[in-house]
Amino acid sequence: MLFAVEEANEDPSFLPNVTVGLQLYDSCVSGSRALGSALGLLSGQLLPTPNFDCCPQRRLLGIIGGMTSPESEAMAELLSVYQVPQISHGSQHPQFSDRHQFPSFLRTVPSRAHQPQAMAKILLYFNWIWVGLLGSDSGAFEWLDQEFRKAVGKNGGCVSFSKRIDYHIANVENAADAIQDSTAKVIICDCYHVHLILLLKVLQKKKVTHRIWLMSTSFPLSGSVLSREAREMLNGGLFLRIHSGPIPGLKHFLSALHPTIYRDNHLIKLFWQDLLGCTWPELKPVGPGAGHVAPNCTGLEQLTPTHLSVLNLNDLTATYQAYLAAKAFLVAYQNLRICSTGEGSLTGSNCARKGNAGPWQLLQHLRAVHFTTRTEEEIFFTQDGEIPAIFDVMNLYLAPDHTLQTTKVGHLDFREAPGKELVINSSTIIWAEGPGKPPLSVCSKTCPLGTRKSPIQGQPSCCYECLHCPKGEISYIEDSTSCLKCPEDQWSNKDKDQCIPKILDFLSYREPLGMALAICTTFLFLLSLTILGIFIWHHHTPIVRANNQRLSYILLCSLALCFLCPFMFIGHPVPVTCALRQAAFGIIFTVCVSTTLAKTITVVSAFRATRPDGRLRKWAGPSLPNAILIGCSLVQVALCVFWVIGWPPEPMKSTEAGPKVTMLCGAGSSELFYAMLSFLGVLALVSLVVAFLARQLPDTFNEAKHITLSMLVFSCVWISFIPAHLSAQGKHTVAVEIFAILASGAGLMGCLFFPKCYIILLQPGKNTRDQMMGKRHFKECNQL
């Protein structure tokens, strides 16, 4: 502040013909002493008299201070009554942003309300989502805890623990235990340095290490007061510092500073005494010099660069804020003096009278002050009475000589657009393990690709377990909260981190199931041709000629064609095979069942038509079986043609869940498909009933028992086919239908023709007319 005043007084263009003065008071970080000093300034005497000014000719324009919030609070409440402007260069409590409670309070430091957001942005930058919070008992810890949790929660972070510390060792021990027990590696500390020292001592005893400390602006702490172990604990940490800049000319001003220039300034003498190690006769020795006899100060001593080095002019945080406060007062006063009518800050844009301006009038100019420092930094006050929030991000690290050093690694400017406030040069950060990738601080490890996060009941959202995605779902990003379902034509790969095209699948000749069905189909086809050949070769024998030889040939030929139908079901489906295979199977099987029905009715009509002139005997000729065969077949042909033309089955891909997509033939019309099967079932049922009724007829020429058995087999196969077909999936539906075709065809062929082939090939003695007519039996009876 002395430098700012001297800088203004030495500039002839700044406040010409005006000499600015100031009075300095030491509040000793005490709110009561700060209040007493403020009363003294208002009264104009050391022993204040409330509401009385002993020096009315003196113009008090404002007060700079205090350094801490407890000091400023008492002063601000008093000065607000008199509308005397006050600029604090260190008070950060959020309460001072209330313009109604503190209308004359301004500050050159940002409110602590910005720090939870600032620290949350740093946590987000390093992806630290699991942290602990410590705070000193400053009266605002509950507010800090609430705001910090809110800011961290917006970025997906969680607070592992939140502890308040003070001078009570029990509270410090409690906080140390929380740090030791928590898995959080990053500790947020908004602590006074005295409380931090106590905590570090306890952590040292508990041997708690490997923590990353992120501290607020209340941290600035001299490494000389810390033990070596405490410095090692803080190594690699970060802290926020209120932005400061260089003060050109300050070093020269300090080197020329001399007590003779400020003879009545008690603080200058103390500064001189401490810096040079001498003692003024009228002052008591303080600090380290109190234990030994120090030479008297003469005022003729000279300051050297060695003396100035202990002032640490590279870190002017508090000094810079005081300089800005004094500069703001001076610029505001200059604006007041050069105010032109219509451009003022008072009501109606009026100006104050230059010779009789009061503090409340200067307050209006202070709120509107806007200037640029010699280092081109723009300074102004926001609506909350503070300069824009700008923080420097500092890194703590141990030097080779084990001293604790700091370096600036970034900055955070809330004037920038959202998302661009924080700039960090992470390559310059020296962590405890050395330069490189920042440490992790998470409650749960990152869920890899192919898994999703699942919350753990009773734990914060940052604590979770990783569950593998179900089949057919993937997660292609780490820490995914859900799995994505693959499209219908795709499936998840083995790692479940990407969808891949499903494997095209169909009933192929190359696979064991397709190969086995093809072999069975070929075998049954050849077997039916073999039986047909046997019947043709022995066409003159009675057993072949019995029961309508022509119908037997038609039945064997249709069975052979039935056994060829499965070849249209095996292989890659194409439109032609899809359209024809169901219709061909239905028509050919209709011929088989119709032929069987015709043979049964032929037997019944032959034995029932006993009267030569009866009506049934007229129908028992060759016209009846032909009519049955042709009529039933035409009905099925008409139904299948209508089906194929109107709703032809086409190749389609199955939509069933699985890594394969099966090529199938759609039914086209399920109603017509089941209508075709129903017609077959009706024919089979009629054949079964007629054959069952004819089972008691004489055995000669009677196939009723064999037809009954064959229809029972046929019916059982197709009745069981329906639930099997509905429950099967993919290409197995095709295999079920092929099996039904082969089983029903084999049942018909086996029940109807195997007994005859047995007699033709192995029992030729029974293949005679006498045997077939039963004459041998009568001859044996006559001989007896």
Image (spheres, grey):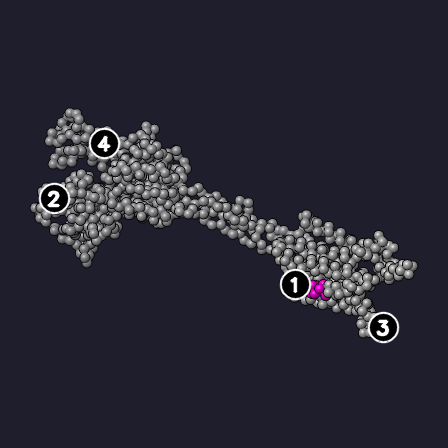
User: Disc 3 and disc 2: Cα gap in Å?
Assistant: 151 Å
Q: Earlier in the sequence, mark 4 or mark 2?
A: 2
- Viewer-proximal residue, 187 or 164? 164
Q: Is residue 680 magenta?
A: yes
Q: Earlier in the sequence, mark 2 or mark 1?
A: 2
Q: Amino acid at mark 3?
A: Pro
Q: Earlier in the sequence, mark 4 or mark 1?
A: 4
Q: Is mark 4 in CB contact (under 8 Å) with mark 1?
A: no
Q: Position of residue 335 (x, y in %)?
A: 19, 50
Q: In front: mark 2 or mark 1?
A: 1
Q: Earlier in the sequence, mark 1 or mark 3?
A: 3
Query: For this view, does 574 lie left or right of residue 88?
Result: right
Mark 2 packing: few (<14 Cα in 10 Å), some, or many (20+)? some
Secondary structure state at the residue bearing disc 1? helix
Secondary structure state at the residue bearing disc 2? helix
User: Disc 4 and disc 2: Cα gap in Å?
Assistant: 33 Å
Query: For this view, does 671 lie left or right of residue 238?
Result: right
